[in-house]
Image (cartoon, helix red, strand yellow):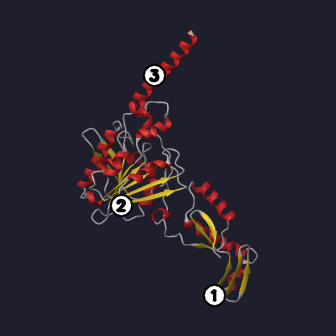
Amino acid sequence: MKYLFITLSSIVVAYLVVLVFIYFYQRNLLYHPSENNYQNDEAKFNYQEVYIEVDSSIKLKSWFLNKDLNSLKTLIIFHGNAGDLSNRIYKLNELNKLDINVLLISWRGFSGNVGSPTEKNLYKDAGAAIKWLNKQGVKNNQIILYGESLGTGVAIEIGKKNVFNSIILESPFTSMEEAAKIYYPFLPIKILLKDRFDSIDKVEKIKIPILIMHGEKDDIIPFFMGKKLFEKANEPKHSYFTSKDDHMMTFDESLLKETALQPIFYPSINKKNLDNFNKKFFQEFDKYPNHLSLLSYDLIGLVYYLSLKNDLSEINKSFKSQNTFKGKIGIFDIKDNKINHKLNFYQIDQGSLKEIF
């Protein structure tokens, strides 16, 4: 009995030590300014490095892509809980292709900024960035709020004022309490938590257009949280939910024009080729191919198969005379520079391969 009491007492003491540690050091677990995951991207855009003053002691290092403040809208990015500005170069490279101005701010404690990040302080930083844009002549109704991961909690807090153009949430969470319970189910999170970011209780206050993006393979913030926020959000609302993306969602034409390429037919692709190409593409680029990539692959494959049993020099001559090419995918007739397909055609339909004719 004595040993049982000692054992139980030791467990209780150890548990209390864990509680004390979590309470006082929880922000070290939440904010990771020195964690850099994307450092090798080359910037393909011009930007100004600006410092946004929050108060006399805090100035936020920021990147400003200024194209035309008078005629174009301005996107302000509130980044996540890890890394510095350079970790978002890959994202800025894609956004720079759009007719839009972009302001990427870094939080206090990040990117060499002094200060300590907390929920309250992040709201102050975001508010200062909005005021800075206003001083540059940008009106609130021309500002698009963009929150990434932890930054979605900030975007929702700022967005509930409903004076902005719209709001975009990438890989959002419902609340820090619900997210923390997934990682620490054995702790009384509700009692211990300092920074709550209760987005699920705030999102229904947003009346401006909202876009929520989330990937099913997100292993940091569960996919169900993005869907839960979307269900509670008001109209007008839009979603971009994918089965391929993880936490740091990638950008391509299919994201910006999701349905534009859906009707495309593929004359040579087959299930085995498709699976192999998807696998090799992911290994090389750490993302899955979109329809443009598949079409390019398919056309190259078409030429390859047509030339498989024919001399390439003879193919060029064939456009001036009747000829029939037989490959692994069917028959390809050329006569008087006109093409007659006798092939098996396929279509990518909701992630699966469907034979058309």
Task: Tell me the element at label 3.
Answer: helix
- Residue 106 visible in the shown view: no
* Closest to the observer, 264 or 85: 264
Q: Of the residues shown, which amino acid type is indicated by label 2?
A: Pro
Label 2 sits on residue: 236
Label 1 sits on residue: 337
Mark 2 or mark 1, which has the lower sequence index?
2
Mark 1 packing: few (<14 Cα in 10 Å), some, or many (20+)?
A: few
The picture quadrant where one finds residue 302 is bottom right
Query: What's the distance in space between the residues labelled 3 and 1, CA to CA?
Result: 81 Å
Q: Quadrant of the N terminus?
A: top right
Q: Residue at x 69, y 84 (%)?
A: 333
Mark 3 or mark 1, which has the lower sequence index?
3
Task: Tell me the element at label 1.
Answer: loop
The picture quadrant where one finds residue 71 is bottom left
Q: Is residue 306 above or below residue 323?
A: above
Q: Of the residues shown, which amino acid type is indicated by label 3?
A: Leu
Q: Is residue 12 above or below residue 311?
A: above
Q: Of the residues shown, which amino acid type is indicated by label 1?
A: Asn
Q: Nearer the viewer, mark 3 or mark 2?
A: 2
Query: What's the distance in space between the residues labelled 2 and 1, CA to CA?
Result: 50 Å
The picture quadrant where one finds residue 213 is bottom left
For this orientation, the residue located farthest to the front is: 1
Q: Is residue 293 above or below residue 123?
A: below
Q: Residue at x 47, y 62 (%)?
A: 255
Q: Nearer the viewer, mark 2 or mark 1?
A: 2
- Circles 3 and 1, Cβ within 8 Å, touching? The answer is no
Query: What's the distance in space between the residues labelled 3 and 2, CA to CA?
Result: 47 Å
* Closest to the observer, 1 or 238: 1
Label 3 sits on residue: 16
Indicate the position of residue 343 as horizontal and vertical percent values.
Answer: 68, 77
